Image (cartoon, rainbow, N blue to C red):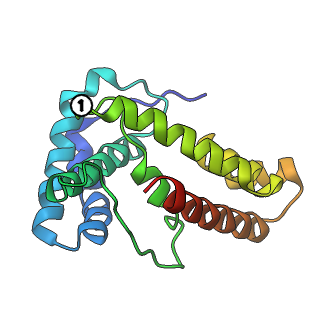
Amino acid sequence: METHQLHPDTWVDLYADYLFNYAVTRVSDSEIAKDLVQDTFIAGLKSAKNFKGEATERTWLIAILKRKVIDHYRKTNSKKGKAEVRMSYSSQTDSEGDWLEERIADPNSNFENDAIENEELGLAIQNCISKLPKKQAQVFKMKTIEGMETEDICNALGINASNLWVMIHRARTGLMDCLNQNWF
């Protein structure tokens, strides 16, 4: 597996626009999105020593930004104690389905209930995955949890990319329905 290195001096040039676009579609406010991107860069600098190189810089920064978005909604929705972020995605993007990743609590968060929330959500996700049709569950795990490339999954399962994306979409829809009923 290739090990990636951090290059914070290039973050603004390489990733600021991408992170801003990601954030603004989730919070619908350009000023808040700018603040979230800035907070992401600061958090990235502060936690650079924890970067293991198992993901690209952009992937790592997006993971931090996702937490910042959730934290933003937690602050604005503190009475509920957790973010229940309902996102609408364009059907033309591969990011459709990031709703699951954005609801998963961060094990490094400072919120006092996160350890319990992580455990409960993890169990709820596993329970919902077990209710999916076998092939949908398998494809979802390979793509979303294991992070396998589309081509590798298609080759391993003998399916085409269109079929894969249909199965992932159906799996995400099923998981969203299941989690909405059993978790949120």
Q: Position of residue 137 (x, y in %)?
A: 73, 51
Q: Nearer the viewer, residue 146 or 171?
A: 171
What's the residue type where badge 1 is placed? Glu
The image quarter containing residue 174 is bottom right
Q: Nearer the viewer, residue 144 or 173?
A: 173
- Left or right, 15 with respect to 184, comes to left
The answer, for residue 147, to whether it is visible in the render is no
Residue drawn at 14 percent across, 61 percent down: 34
The quadrant of the rendering that contains the N terminus is: top right
The quadrant of the rendering that contains the C terminus is: bottom left
The answer, for residue 95, to whether it is visible in the render is yes
Q: Position of residue 130 (x, y in %)?
A: 72, 47
Residue drawn at 57 percent across, 46 percent down: 125
Task: Determine which residue is flagged by label 1.
Answer: 112
Determine the secondary structure under disc 1: loop
Is disc 1 surrounded by few (<14), some (14 to 19) or many (20+) residues within 10 Å? few
- Left or right, 1 with respect to 38, comes to right
Residue drawn at 19 percent across, 58 percent down: 77
Going by the picture, which residue comes out furthest to the top?
49
Residue drawn at 19 percent across, 32 percent down: 45
- Left or right, 70 with respect to 160, comes to left
Q: Can you say whether 176 is above or below 29 in the image?
A: above
